[in-house]
Amino acid sequence: MTLPLLTARDLAGCEHRLALDHLNAREVVDASDDPSVTRRKEAAAVHRAAVAQVLAGIHTDEPGTFVEVASGPISERVAATLSACAAGAGWVFNAALPTDRRAGRRGGSELLARVGDGYVPVIVVNHRVSVPGGEGTIRTSPLFTWLPADDPTRSMRSHRRDVLRLAHLTRLLEHAGLATDTGLGGSIGLDADCIVVHDLTPAMPGYDETLARRHAIAAGALSTVPSRIGECRTCPWWVRCGPELVAARDVSLVINGNQARVARDAGLLTVDDLADYTGPAPDDWSGGDIADAVVLARAWRRGVSLVRRVEVPTVARADVEVDVDMESYGEDGAYLWGTLLTDRTDPTRPVRYRPFVTWDPLPTVDEGRSFAEFWAWLTAEREAAAATGKTFAAYCYSQSAENRWLLGSATRFAGLPGVPTLEEVKAFIASPQWVDVYEAVGANFICPQGKGLKKIAPVAGFGWRDPEAGGEASMEWYRVAVGVADGTPDAGQRDRILAYNEDDVWATKVLREWITDGAAEQIVHRDDL
């Protein structure tokens, strides 16, 4: 039997999607990428190109050491890769490896690094593969040579997809007769300042098992069924799977992927099974209280969009309140800090939206300028409130993103005029003056449709002016606003982003006021389901 040819992409993610891709190729679905997927692919391509330029620059004085395979038909790329390896190139970029038809695998590596008479695979990925801090010994290698050594300054950020891909490439190198006996591979992440070294030996048996299972699925020898997971949001097959799941009243419609697996193992196959469940949490249950999951199922069955978990919902309030919303562009930086100030003690002071923004394309040092201005303004409002005996609170919706860029900006732009110290930012984040409305929503409500601001604020009566408003959409608007696509900035898209950001801070304000003004008490209580 001829095995389906699988790439490393086929080894992770939804098994049912793999089955549909291979067994239903003639079914017509919209296979175009979701805009968020397109943006991630474009960002990854830009990152790969930047790494290639860095590596080429390192080896510019060593002819033949660094070889970049030209883009083109796969057969030509394979031939060029093999030719470079035969010539003893130290580094081969954009490598394509011979297809292993007997084992049913194909693929290529951003980089091959010569070690002895063979090569190790090195992938270039658009995420972080290490973080500062020596919480565990890892090995890294400099970019100019393959020289793995213990690195006590970093900790590994492990990604299963990366390890599977490196294992996949190792097997392809073995097939081509180009592998080494080191059992190693490498990854270059967003920082692109070193190669993180992976010991692949322990991962190879798991890779082989995964490949065998995925082959069985792709060949139709192992059946799969749909189940709602995060990947569904951008999957072209959702137009088929979604209605199937609703028709079956599948339990994954109300709980996450791992919980759904555990629930099915316990015999809870449908939303109704879960809604009627009164027992203890099944073995291996994780990610929340089973009682909340039961409430979610009951709410779904009755069409309820929000459920109170407490008698009287609360959220911290203050005399002077500032709602904050940050806009970032991928990993490149935070270009906009939007604020909305409300002085509850002074009705003559207007509620005012104020943005702190840079329109210089990220990454840019001007980001430090806009961040410093935002911090100076926020600090002045805090100090003014304290000086007049008023309480102060700043609010955001899901502080993980804001905290990341608060801390990151203080670190990256340390020393620039007005940029706070890291200790100052940490003290603010840890203070009661920084309030996460997302956490308040979770403490007060059970949310069958999710806890995102776009899901919850409409329950409080708020609506966005732009029907396409959303985080992923704003990424595309930003590209046009600063001229990433064609080099021509678009003032109209800048205005669109500012309006969207203003709506976000207004939504946060409206939601938290709705929680505390008594209106939220009209939401159905969990005991009433």
Image (tube, rainbow, N blue to C red):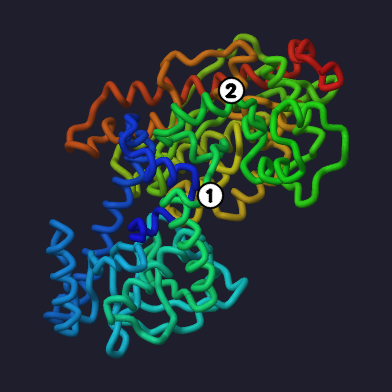
Picture residue at 13% right of the left edge, 62% below the top: 70
Dividing the picture into quadrants, the one containing residue 86 is bottom left
Q: Position of residue 191 (x, y in %)?
A: 39, 62
Q: Position of residue 281 (x, y in %)?
A: 82, 43
Looking at the image, residue 500 lies above or below residue 138: above
Q: Is residue 83 left or right of residue 54?
A: left
Dividing the picture into quadrants, the one containing residue 255 is top right
Ranked by sequence position, the earlier of labels 2 and 1 is 2
Q: Quadrant of the C terminus?
A: top right
Q: Is residue 161 left or right of residue 380?
A: left
Picture residue at 23% right of the left edge, 65% below the top: 96
- Foreground residue, 401 or 35? 35
Question: What's the amino acid at mark 1?
Answer: Pro
Q: Position of residue 145 (x, y in %)?
A: 31, 82
Question: Which residue is farthest front?
Answer: 1
- Foreground residue, 47 or 76? 76
Q: Quadrant of the N terminus?
A: bottom left
Q: Which residue position holds label 2?
A: 247
**SS at mark 1?**
loop
Dividing the picture into quadrants, the one containing residue 179 is bottom left
Residue 279 visible from this viewpoint:
yes
- Foreground residue, 18 or 419? 18
**SS at mark 2?**
helix
Picture residue at 22% right of the left edge, 73% below the top: 92
Q: Which residue position holds label 1?
A: 420
